[in-house]
C-alpha cells in the first residue's frame, strides 16, 4: 500500500515506479496519482492568486479560475491564446525579455507589471514564474498575484511623499520670497538711512552757519544795546541836572506866594516837574538794570528780616493810608539776592499795593518754598485787575489808568520789578480774581 | 555855623543848593564853587569848609582829581566829602577807590540832602 503522508512528497513513489510488476499494483499507483492530480487541481482552482502554465512561446495552456476575479476573463477565454494578448502594449517588451530569460534557464523570480482587465482597466499584478519539465517538453509555470491594494497603499505613500515634497517646495519658495522682500526692505532702509545721514550733515552745517550768523547778530545787537545804555545814561544825566533846581526851588517859591491863582499855577508846575522827575529816574533805572554791565551784589539774605526792614522803612506810607500790612514770611528762609535791588522791588510792589487799596485795606506778604526757589507773594484786598490788564502790567509804560492822566505813576515800576526778578533768575507774575477783588503779585528768588 | 562848600560847574546847581539849604537850616553857610578850579582856589585862600558837596563830572578839574588833592593834603584830608552826581554808573565804576564815601544822586529833594549832611557830620564827631 502506498503511504500517502503528504501530497508534496512523491519522490520516493516515483523512484518506486520501476518496481511495479503487476496490474493491480499499477492500478493502485494510477489511482494514487489521479487523486493527487485532483488535489492539486482543487488547490489551484481555489487559490486567490492565478496559477498558470504557458508554452515556451507564451501560449496559455492552463490558467486557474481566479483569473475571472482578477482579469474578468473566464479561463476558457484565455486558454490557447498568447499571454501577451492580456498585457498592456507598453509592457510587452518586458514580458518578451522575461520569457527569453526564462528559456535560457535564468531564474526570473518575481516582478511587477499589469494585466488588462476585460473592461480595459489596468490591474497591477506581481508575476512569479519558472521553467519546468513536462514530459519531454518544457513549460512555464507561474502565479499572478493581484496587488491593487498594495499599489494603492504604495501610491498613497508616494502621493503623500510627493505632496510633502511639494509643500516643502512651496514653503521654501514662500520663505525665499519673504526673504527677498525683507532684503529689499533692508536695502530701502539702508538707503533711507544714508539719505538721513546726509540730511543730518547738511542740517548740522546749516545750523553752524546759522549759529555763526546769530552770534554775529547778537554781538551787533549787544553793541547797539550798549550804545543805547550809554545814550540813555547820558540823556539821563542831562535831564536830571536841570530837574534839581526845579524840584527844589519851586516848592520854596510856592511857600512864599500868597495869591491863590498864582499858587495854583505853581502847584500844577510842581506836579508836572515831579512827574517828569519820576519818569526820568525810572527810565534810567530800567536802562541801568537792563544793561549788561549792571552788577548785582548777590548775598545770602534773611528774607523775613529784610522784608521787615522794608516795611519799617515805608511805615509812614502805611500809616498815612491806614493800611494793615502783615509779614507772614517764615523765619530762617534765606534767599540769594542783591539786598538793595530786593528793596527796590519790594518798594515798588508795596507802593503799588497801597495805591490800589482803599483806606483800612490789608496787605499780606507770604512765602512758600518751591523746589530750589522761594515764591513770595504780595497780596492786597484792593481794586484788583481785569484779565486783559493782567497781561500787560509788566509792559513798559503800561498804565492801568487808560487815560494816562495818572500823575502818580509813570508805568515803569513793574517793568523794573520784572527785570530785577529775572536778573536773579526768578519769575514774576500777577493774579487777580477780578476787578474789585484784590490782586496778588508773585515772584520767585533762588534759595541759598 | 556849619560851613558847606558846594562844587559844581553848573552855577544853577550851586545856586539852588545854597538857597534851599540855607532856608532849611539857618546855621548853614553855603559857599559856592562854580567848578573844580574855583574850589581849589578858595581852599588855598583859606576857605576851609566843614563838609564838601562835590560834583564828579566837571570840565575843568574832575571831581575825582579834587578828591585826590584834598585827601593828599594833611590840612584838608579829614573834611568829609559827599559826591553829588547824576551818573551813579560812574560812581559805581570808581567805587573801589571811593569806597565808604557818601554820594547823592541828582535830582534829590533838599530834605534828603540835609539828612545826609547831618548824618555824615554826626559820624565825623
Image (spheres, rainbow, N blue to C red):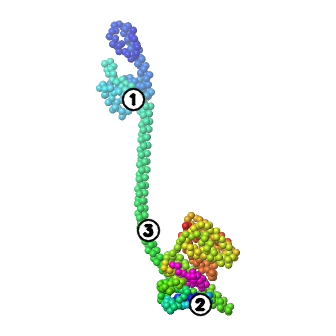
Secondary structure of the residue carrying tag 2 is helix
Quadrant of the image occupied by residue A408: bottom right
User: Taking A90 as reference, is A21 above or below it?
Assistant: above
Along the line of sight, the residue nearer the viewer: A232 or A139? A232
Place of residue A315 in the rendered image (x, y in percent of width and height, measured from the top left): 65, 76
**Residues flagged by tags 1 and 2 on a common chain:** no
A265 sits to left or right of A182: right
Residue at x-position 33% and y-position 9%:
A19
- Residue at mark 2: B19
Q: Is residue B91 visible?
A: yes
N-terminal-most mark, 3 or 1:
1
Residue A126, disc:
1
Place of residue A440 in the rendered image (x, y in percent of width and height, measured from the top left): 63, 71
Residue at x-position 41% and y-position 41%:
A165
Query: Which mark lies nearer to you, 3 or 1?
Result: 3
Quadrant of the image occupied by residue A259: bottom right
User: Taking A285 as reference, is A92 above or below it?
Assistant: above
Q: Residues within 10 Å of mark 1 (few under 14, many from 20)?
A: some
**Which chain is indicated by disc 3?**
A
Q: Quadrant of the N terminus of chain B?
A: bottom right
- Residue at mark 3: A207
B28 sits to left or right of A53: right
Along the line of sight, the residue nearer the viewer: A168 or A410? A410
**Cα separation between marks 3 and 2:** 65 Å
Residue B97, disc:
none
Along the line of sight, the residue nearer the viewer: A264 or A403? A264
Secondary structure of the residue carrying tag 3 is helix
Secondary structure of the residue carrying tag 1 is strand
Place of residue A350 in the rendered image (x, y in percent of width and height, measured from the top left): 63, 75
Q: Which residues are magenta?
A: B99-125
Amino acid at each position: 500500500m502506498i503511504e500517502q503522508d503528504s501530497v508534496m512528497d512523491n519522490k520516493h513513489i516515483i523512484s518506486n515506479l520501476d518496481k511495479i510488476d503487476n496490474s493491480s499494483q499499477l492500478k493502485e499507483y494510477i489511482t494514487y496519482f489521479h487523486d493527487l492530480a485532483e488535489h492539486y487541481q482543487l488547490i489551484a482552482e481555489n487559490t486567490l492568486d492565478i496559477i498558470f502554465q504557458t508554452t515556451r512561446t507564451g501560449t496559455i495552456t492552463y490558467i486557474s479560475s481566479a483569473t475571472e476575479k482578477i482579469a474578468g476573463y473566464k479561463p476558457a477565454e484565455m486558454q490557447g491564446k498568447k499571454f501577451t494578448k492580456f498585457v498592456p502594449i507598453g509592457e510587452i517588451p518586458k514580458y518578451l525579455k522575461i520569457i527569453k530569460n526564462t528559456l535560457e534557464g535564468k531564474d526570473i523570480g518575481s516582478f511587477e507589471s499589469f494585466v488588462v482587465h476585460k473592461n480595459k482597466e489596468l490591474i497591477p499584478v506581481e508575476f512569479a514564474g519558472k521553467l519546468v519539465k513536462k514530459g519531454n517538453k518544457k513549460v512555464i509555470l507561474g502565479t499572478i498575484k493581484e496587488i491593487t491594494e498594495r499599489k494603492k497603499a504604495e501610491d498613497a505613500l508616494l502621493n503623500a511623499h510627493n505632496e510633502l515634497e511639494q509643500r516643502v517646495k512651496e514653503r521654501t519658495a514662500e520663505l525665499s520670497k519673504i526673504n527677498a522682500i525683507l532684503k529689499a526692505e533692508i536695502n530701502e532702509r539702508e538707503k533711507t538711512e544714508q539719505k538721513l545721514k546726509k540730511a543730518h550733515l547738511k542740517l548740522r552745517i546749516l545750523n553752524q552757519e546759522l549759529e555763526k550768523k546769530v552770534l554775529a547778530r547778537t554781538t551787533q545787537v549787544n553793541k547797539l544795546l550798549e550804545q543805547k545804555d550809554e545814550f540813555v545814561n547820558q540823556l539821563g544825566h542831562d535831564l536830571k541836572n536841570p530837574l534839581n533846581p526845579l524840584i527844589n526851588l519851586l516848592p520854596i517859591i510856592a511857600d512864599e506866594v500868597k495869591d491863590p491863582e498864582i499858587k495854583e499855577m505853581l502847584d500844577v508846575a510842581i506836579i508836572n516837574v515831579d512827574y517828569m522827575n519820576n519818569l526820568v529816574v525810572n527810565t534810567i533805572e530800567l536802562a541801568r538794570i537792563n544793561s549788561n554791565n549792571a552788577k548785582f551784589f548777590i548775598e545770602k539774605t534773611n528774607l523775613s528780616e529784610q522784608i521787615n526792614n522794608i516795611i519799617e522803612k515805608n511805615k509812614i506810607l502805611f500809616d498815612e493810608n491806614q493800611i494793615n500790612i502783615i509779614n507772614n514770611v517764615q523765619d530762617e528762609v534765606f534767599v540769594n539776592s542783591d539786598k538793595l535791588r530786593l528793596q527796590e522791588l519790594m518798594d515798588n510792589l508795596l507802593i503799588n499795593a497801597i495805591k490800589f487799596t482803599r483806606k483800612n485795606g490789608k496787605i499780606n506778604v507770604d512765602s512758600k518754598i518751591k523746589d530750589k526757589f522761594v515764591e513770595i507773594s504780595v497780596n492786597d484786598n484792593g481794586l484788583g485787575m481785569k484779565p486783559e490788564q493782567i497781561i500787560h502790567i509788566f509792559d513798559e509804560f503800561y498804565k492801568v489808568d487808560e487815560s494816562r492822566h495818572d500823575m502818580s505813576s509813570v508805568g515803569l515800576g513793574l517793568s523794573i520789578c520784572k527785570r530785577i526778578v529775572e536778573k536773579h533768575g526768578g519769575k514774576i507774575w500777577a493774579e487777580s480774581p477780578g476787578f474789585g477783588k484784590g490782586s496778588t503779585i508773585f515772584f520767585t528768588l533762588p534759595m541759598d | 555855623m556849619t560851613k558847606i562848600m558846594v562844587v559844581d560847574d553848573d552855577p544853577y546847581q550851586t545856586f539852588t543848593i545854597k538857597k534851599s539849604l540855607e532856608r532849611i537850616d539857618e546855621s548853614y553857610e553855603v559857599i559856592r564853587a562854580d567848578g573844580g578850579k574855583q574850589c581849589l582856589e578858595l581852599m588855598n585862600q583859606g576857605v576851609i569848609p566843614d563838609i564838601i558837596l562835590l560834583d564828579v563830572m566837571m570840565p575843568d578839574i574832575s571831581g575825582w582829581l579834587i578828591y585826590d588833592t584834598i585827601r593828599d593834603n594833611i590840612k584838608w584830608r579829614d573834611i568829609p566829602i559827599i559826591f553829588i552826581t547824576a551818573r551813579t554808573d560812574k560812581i559805581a565804576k570808581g567805587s573801589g577807590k571811593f569806597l565808604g564815601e557818601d554820594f547823592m544822586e541828582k535830582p534829590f529833594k533838599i530834605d534828603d540832602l540835609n539828612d545826609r549832611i547831618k548824618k555824615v557830620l554826626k559820624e565825623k564827631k
